Image (spheres, rainbow, N blue to C red):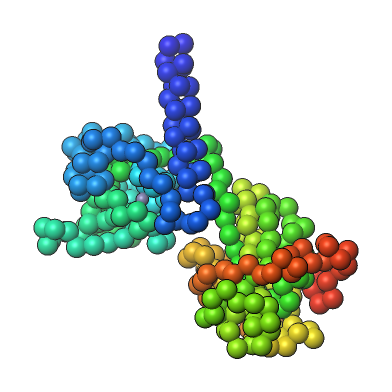
Amino acid sequence: MQVCIMKILQIVIVALGLTIIVFAAQRPGGKEKMSYKKLTAEEKRVIVQKGTEPPFSGEYLTNKEPGTYLCKRCGAELYRSDDKFDSHCGWPSFDDEIAGAVKRVPDADRIRTEIICANCGGHLGHVFGGEGLTDKNIRHCVNSISLVFVPADKAATKPMKAYFVGGCFWGVEYWFEKTEGVITARSGYMGGTVEKPTYEQVCSGRTGHAETVEVEYDPMQVSFEQLAKLFFEIHDPTQRDRQGPDIGKQYRSAIFYVDEQQKQIARQLVKQLRKKGFNVVTQLQPAKKFWPAEQYHQNYYEKKDKQPYCHIRTKRF
Ligand SMILES: [Zn+2]
């Protein structure tokens, strides 16, 4: 009984800590303004002063539970349990990282390669290659103390974003607003060079921006793949630089992906459609800054109580 209460207490404390981290991570203003966790002296010694915890001492060394490992300092997702393996080196070992989450820098010893959190720069450990321990032949040797583990079943879901470009944004927004798992869909502009563009500027076709819909979704309820499939069915991905009566580069077909996973999924779907005979011209590009459109463009069809004129769902998958 005593053990049980202790365990519950431990879970509650971890959950509370994580809620704070996740909350901090989701504050408006993006990653840069995120507040960091206050570190203990030992955490500071490793994470800030690039120290090393004693081997075979870390709390995650033998952890085999499914879940995700976050940066202790900033809460960024770094590693998945699927990539963790037993290297017998005394520290948690991973043979892969979450895309873009870990930065490699030459160590001060000029021999090893240090790994740091790409978001906050916190020290994680070192990365080694060519040891032949796993098929990927990579070993991220990470201090437990630099990490926070979130078991898969307790993971607080963090809303995700996706950006779709398929003609007039009113119609695209209309469809995503109605989709289960979508928290919000916003009309705006992306992909160009002009800061704070106006609708008139974008309409001129000279800003490089496209009418873009920002979709914020709960990945536990709807996947990026489901959203992207919907996207390919509510606009015609074979039309280049136009969508029905709307003509111009601002009405091109594109997906602005936010990470490697979205990019790969989008690529796969384009491949599938091409196999089915659709000459897809959809561009796949990394997301840039999203500029929300003027208020009168938001929820346009809902406000007007009308149906989209050129976004009708056509089954393609
Ligand atoms: Zn970090």
In this rendering, is residue 211 above or below 148?
below
In this rendering, is residue 236 above or below 171?
below
Picture residue at 58% right of the left edge, 51% below the top: 159
In this rendering, is residue 154 above or below 213?
above
Picture residue at 68% right of the left edge, 82% below the top: 200
How many discs mark residues in the rendered view?
Answer: 0
Q: In x, y percent, where is residue 4? A: 46, 16
Which residue occupies the foreground of this view, 283 or 309? 309
Q: Quadrant of residue 119?
A: bottom left
Q: In x, y percent, where is residue 206? A: 60, 88
63 relative position to 201: left or right: left
Q: Quadrant of residue 170?
A: bottom right
Using the rendered image of the protein, determine whether residue 76 is visible from the camera's viewpoint: yes
96 relative position to 270: left or right: left
Q: In x, y percent, where is residue 112? A: 16, 59
Picture residue at 80% right of the left edge, 86% below the top: 245
Which residue occupies the foreground of this view, 158 or 134? 158
130 relative position to 230: left or right: left
In this rendering, is residue 67 above or below 31?
above
Q: In x, y percent, where is residue 17? A: 44, 34
Which residue occupies the foreground of this view, 15 or 56? 15
Furthest-top residue in view? Answer: 1
Q: Quadrant of residue 102?
A: bottom left
244 relative position to 108: left or right: right
Picture residue at 64% right of the left edge, 83% below the top: 201
Q: Quadrant of the C terminus?
A: bottom right
Using the rendered image of the protein, determine whether residue 79 is visible from the camera's viewpoint: no
